[in-house]
């Protein structure tokens, strides 16, 4: 069961990093003349935002989900 936790932690971490790096790259839209509300609207339609959220949930569950110890 421990290997499943490590695997899910790595999957969650990979999703969160991939999405986070992409969202940071989209910050270049602010220098191109977009305002912050337009940026927020744009990233709310992108899959990268959901990758960060799902990755964070997977990381949290893999760390804090209780184990069955006998």
Image: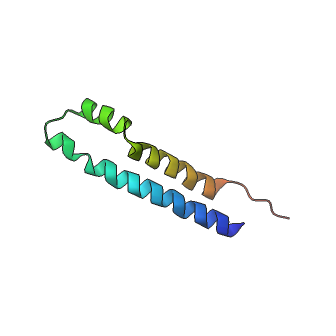
Residue 47's x, y, as percent? 41, 44
Residue drawn at 32 percent across, 31 percent down: 41
Image-based side of 20 in relation to 15, left or right: left
Residue drawn at 55 percent across, 48 percent down: 57
Image-based side of 44 in relation to 63, left or right: left
Residue 18's x, y, as percent? 39, 56
Q: Residue furthest bottom?
A: 3
Residue drawn at 48 percent across, 45 percent down: 53
Q: Can you say which quadrant of the picture contains the C terminus?
A: bottom right
Nearer the observer, 34 or 68: 34
Residue 10's x, y, as percent? 53, 64
Q: Residue furthest right?
A: 70
Residue 56's place in the image compared with 9, above or below, is: above
Looking at the rendering, which quadrant does residue 37 occupy? top left
Q: Can you say which quadrant of the picture contains the N terminus?
A: bottom right
Image-based side of 48 in relation to 57, left or right: left
Residue 32's place in the image compared with 19, above or below, is: above
Give the total of numbered labels: 0
Residue 58's x, y, as percent? 57, 52
Residue drawn at 46 percent across, 55 percent down: 15
């Amino acid at each position: 069961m421990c290997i499943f936790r490590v695997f899910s932690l790595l999957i969650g971490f990979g999703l969160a990093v991939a999405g986070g790096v992409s969202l940071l790259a989209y910050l270049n839209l602010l220098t191109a003349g977009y305002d912050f509300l337009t940026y927020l609207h744009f990233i709310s339609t992108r899959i990268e935002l959901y990758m960060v959220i799902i990755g964070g949930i997977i990381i949290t569950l893999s760390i804090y989900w209780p184990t069955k110890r006998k």
